[in-house]
Image: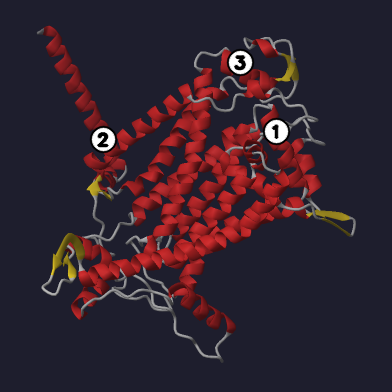
C-alpha cells in the first residue's frame, strides 16, 4: 500500500513537471499551434511512400553504428606490426588504419557486428534513396511545387554515393586501396588541373600519406553534417508542401487525405523503424560483408581479380572497362578520354539531367499548375520509357563492372563479353524505351476497353445459332474513378514556321511526349468532374504563361 502511494506521488510530480515545462515552452514559442498542426497532419498509407522512411531509418542506424566505430578506428597510414587475434596476419607490417579495423573485427566486443551493420545500412540507405527517387520520378511527384525538394533529394543521393565511397576506402585493405588508385586516376584525368588536385588530395604521389585521414574527416564530419541538414530541410519541405497522393475517390488535386500523424502514422512508422533496425542487425550478424582479413593489407603494386566496389559505384567501374583506350596530347596536356569520359563526363551529365529534368518537362508541357496527384506510370509513356532506359543503361554498366567474374563463371572470353556490353550500353536503353512506351500505351488501350465493355465475368453463353458470347459487368465506382481521373496534358500547338526556334523545338518535344495517347470514353459531365478534381489548387484552373 505504501509503495503504491509513493508511485502515485512520483507520477503526479512527473505529470506536473511535464505540464509546467510545456507551459514555459508554449509561452516563449508557438508550441501549441505547431504541435496541433503537426499531430493532425495527414500522411498517405500507400506502401510506396514508406521508401523514404526506410532511407531515414537506415541513416539513423548509420549514425549510431558509425559513432561506435569512430571510437576505435585510427585513420593513420603509419606502419605497425599486427599483434591481434587473427593468426594468419600476426606479425605482418600493416597500416594503423588496417590494424585498428582488424582490432575492431576480432578484439572489440561487438565490433564486427557494428562494422557489418554499418556496411549493410550504407547499402540499404543508398538503395532506399535511389528507389525513392525512382518512385518520385515515375509518379511525377517532382513537379511544381516540389522542384526544389527534388533538387534536395538528388543532392542527398549524390552525397550518399560520396559518403559510401569514403567509408569503404578507409580500412586500407587491398580492395579499398584498389578503389583509391582508381579514384586517383580519375582525378588525374581532369585536364590541366587534375594532377594538382590529385597531388593535393593524396598529399603527394600515389599512394601518398594523407588521403585516408582526409577521407576520414569527410566521412565522419563534413558529409554527415550536410546530410543531416539536408534531411531536415527535406522533411520540413515535405510537411510544408504536403504529400502527393494516388487518384482515388475523395482524393483530388485540392485536398490531402490520409491518416493523422498521431496515433496512426506514429505507430506504423515506429514499427517500420524497428523492422529496419532488426533486419539490419540480423544481416550484420549472419551475412558476412567486406572481410578485410581475407583481402589483406593494401600494397600499391598488387591487385586481385574479383575486385569490384559496392554496387552503387559499380557503374563507374563498368564504364571504365567498356571505354576503349583513347588519349590526346594537346599543347603539352594529356586528355585521357578513356578515363575522363566514362568516369567524369558521364556521371556529371547524369546528375545534370537529374537536376534539370523538372524544368525540362515543365517547359515541354507548358504546364505551370501545382500537382498533388500522382501520375500512374502508364499514363506518361515517354517519361516512363526514359526512366526504364536509364535503369537499363545503369544495369549494363553495373554488369560490365564484373565482366571478369562473369567471364570466369560462364567460361567465355573477356574481350568478347566486353564487346557485347559495348553494344548493349547503346542498344539496350533504346530497346527498353521503345518496349516500355508500347507497353504503357497497350495498358491504356486495355483500360479503355474495360471502360467501354466492362470486366469479364468468366461466364460464356451460347446463342441459338450456336455462337459463343462472353458476359461483362461494369466497373465499380472506385475503379472507374481511378481510371478516369488522370491529368495528361495535350501537346502544344505548332507555333508556325516564323516562330523562334526554341518555340518550334518546344512544340516538337511536346508532340513527342504527348502526341500518341489513348483517350478514355467520358461524358460531358464526367469531363467536367475530372477537370474539377485535377484543377490547380491555387488559381482554380490552368496557370497562365505569365505566372
Contact (Cβ within 8 Å) of mark 2 with mark 3: no
Q: Which quadrant holds the C terminus?
A: bottom left
Read off the residue under disc 3.
Answer: 103
Element class at badge 3: helix
Read off the residue under disc 2.
Answer: 22
* As drawn, 262 above or below 96: below
Q: For this view, does 454 lie left or right of residue 253? A: left
Please tell me which residue is depicted at 14% across the width and 68% down the height of the picture.
462
Q: For this view, does 539 lie left or right of residue 131? A: left
Can residue 320 be seen in this snapshot?
A: no
Please tell me which residue is depicted at 41% across the width and 72% down the height of the picture.
368
Please tell me which residue is depicted at 63% across the width and 31% down the height of the picture.
216
Q: Position of residue 518 (x, y in %)?
A: 35, 74
Q: For this view, does 68 lie left or right of residue 544? A: right
Can residue 57 be seen in this snapshot?
A: yes
Number of numbered markers:
3
Element class at badge 1: loop
Q: Position of residue 372 (x, y in %)?
A: 33, 61
Between 381 and 220, which is closer to the camera in this rendering? Answer: 381
For label 3, count other residues whose C-alpha is less than 10 Å away and answer few (under 14), some (14-19) or many (20+).
many
Contact (Cβ within 8 Å) of mark 1 with mark 3: no
Q: Position of residue 130 (x, y in %)?
A: 48, 47
For label 1, count other residues whose C-alpha is less than 10 Å away and answer few (under 14), some (14-19) or many (20+).
few
Element class at badge 2: helix
Read off the residue under disc 1.
Answer: 305
Amino acid at each position: 500500500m505504501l509503495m503504491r502511494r509513493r508511485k502515485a506521488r512520483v507520477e503526479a510530480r512527473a505529470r506536473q513537471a511535464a505540464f509546467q515545462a510545456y507551459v514555459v515552452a508554449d509561452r516563449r514559442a508557438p508550441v501549441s499551434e505547431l504541435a496541433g498542426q503537426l499531430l493532425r497532419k495527414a500522411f498517405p498509407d500507400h506502401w510506396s511512400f514508406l521508401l523514404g522512411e526506410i532511407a531515414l531509418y537506415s541513416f539513423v542506424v548509420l549514425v549510431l553504428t558509425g559513432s561506435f566505430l569512430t571510437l576505435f578506428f585510427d585513420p593513420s597510414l603509419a606502419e605497425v606490426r599486427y599483434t591481434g587475434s587473427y593468426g594468419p596476419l600476426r606479425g605482418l607490417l600493416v597500416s594503423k588504419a588496417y590494424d585498428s579495423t582488424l582490432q575492431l573485427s576480432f578484439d572489440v566486443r561487438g565490433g564486427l557486428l557494428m562494422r557489418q551493420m554499418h556496411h549493410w545500412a550504407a547499402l540499404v540507405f543508398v538503395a532506399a534513396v535511389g528507389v525513392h527517387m525512382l518512385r518520385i520520378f515515375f509518379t511525377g511527384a517532382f513537379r511544381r511545387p516540389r522542384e526544389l525538394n527534388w533538387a534536395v533529394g538528388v543532392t542527398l543521393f549524390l552525397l550518399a554515393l560520396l559518403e559510401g565511397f569514403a567509408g569503404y576506402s578507409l580500412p586500407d585493405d587491398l580492395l579499398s586501396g584498389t578503389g583509391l588508385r582508381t579514384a586517383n586516376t580519375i582525378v588525374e584525368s581532369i585536364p590541366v588541373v587534375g594532377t594538382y588536385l590529385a597531388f593535393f588530395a593524396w598529399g603527394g604521389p600515389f599512394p601518398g600519406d594523407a588521403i585516408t585521414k582526409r577521407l576520414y574527416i569527410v566521412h565522419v564530419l563534413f558529409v554527415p553534417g550536410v546530410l543531416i541538414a539536408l534531411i531536415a530541410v527535406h522533411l520540413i519541405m515535405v510537411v510544408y508542401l504536403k504529400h502527393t497522393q494516388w487518384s482515388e475517390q475523395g482524393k483530388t488535386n485540392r485536398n490531402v487525405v490520409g491518416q493523422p500523424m498521431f496515433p496512426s502514422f506514429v505507430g506504423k512508422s515506429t514499427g517500420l523503424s524497428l523492422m529496419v533496425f532488426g533486419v539490419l542487425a540480423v544481416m550484420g550478424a549472419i551475412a558476412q560483408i567486406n572481410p578485410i582479413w581475407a583481402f589483406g593489407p593494401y600494397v600499391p603494386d598488387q591487385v586481385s581479380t574479383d575486385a569490384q566496389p559496392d554496387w552503387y559505384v559499380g557503374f563507374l567501374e563498368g564504364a571504365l572497362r567498356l571505354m576503349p583506350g583513347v588519349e590526346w596530347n594537346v599543347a603539352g596536356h594529356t586528355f585521357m578520354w578513356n578515363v575522363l569520359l566514362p568516369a567524369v563526363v558521364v556521371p556529371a551529365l547524369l546528375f545534370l539531367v537529374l537536376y534539370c529534368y523538372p524544368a525540362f518537362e515543365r517547359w515541354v508541357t507548358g504546364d505551370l499548375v501545382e500537382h498533388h496527384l500522382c501520375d500512374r506510370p502508364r499514363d506518361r509513356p515517354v517519361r516512363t520509357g526514359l526512366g526504364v532506359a536509364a535503369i537499363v543503361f545503369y544495369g549494363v554498366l553495373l554488369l560490365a563492372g564484373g565482366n571478369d567474374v562473369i567471364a570466369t563463371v560462364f567460361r567465355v572470353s573477356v574481350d568478347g563479353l566486353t564487346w557485347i556490353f559495348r553494344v548493349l550500353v547503346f542498344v539496350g536503353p533504346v530497346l527498353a524505351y521503345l518496349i516500355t512506351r508500347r507497353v504503357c500505351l497497350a495498358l491504356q488501350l486495355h483500360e479503355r476497353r474495360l471502360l467501354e465493355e466492362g470486366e469479364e465475368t468468366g461466364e460464356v453463353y451460347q446463342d441459338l445459332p450456336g455462337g459463343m458470347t462472353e458476359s461483362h459487368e461494369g466497373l465499380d465506382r472506385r475503379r472507374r474513378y481511378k481510371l478516369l481521373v488522370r491529368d495528361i496534358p495535350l501537346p502544344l500547338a505548332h507555333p508556325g514556321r516564323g516562330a523562334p526556334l526554341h518555340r518550334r523545338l518546344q512544340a516538337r518535344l511536346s508532340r513527342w511526349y504527348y502526341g500518341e495517347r489513348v483517350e478514355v470514353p467520358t461524358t460531358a459531365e464526367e469531363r467536367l468532374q475530372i477537370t474539377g478534381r485535377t484543377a490547380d489548387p491555387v488559381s482554380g484552373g490552368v496557370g497562365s504563361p505569365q505566372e
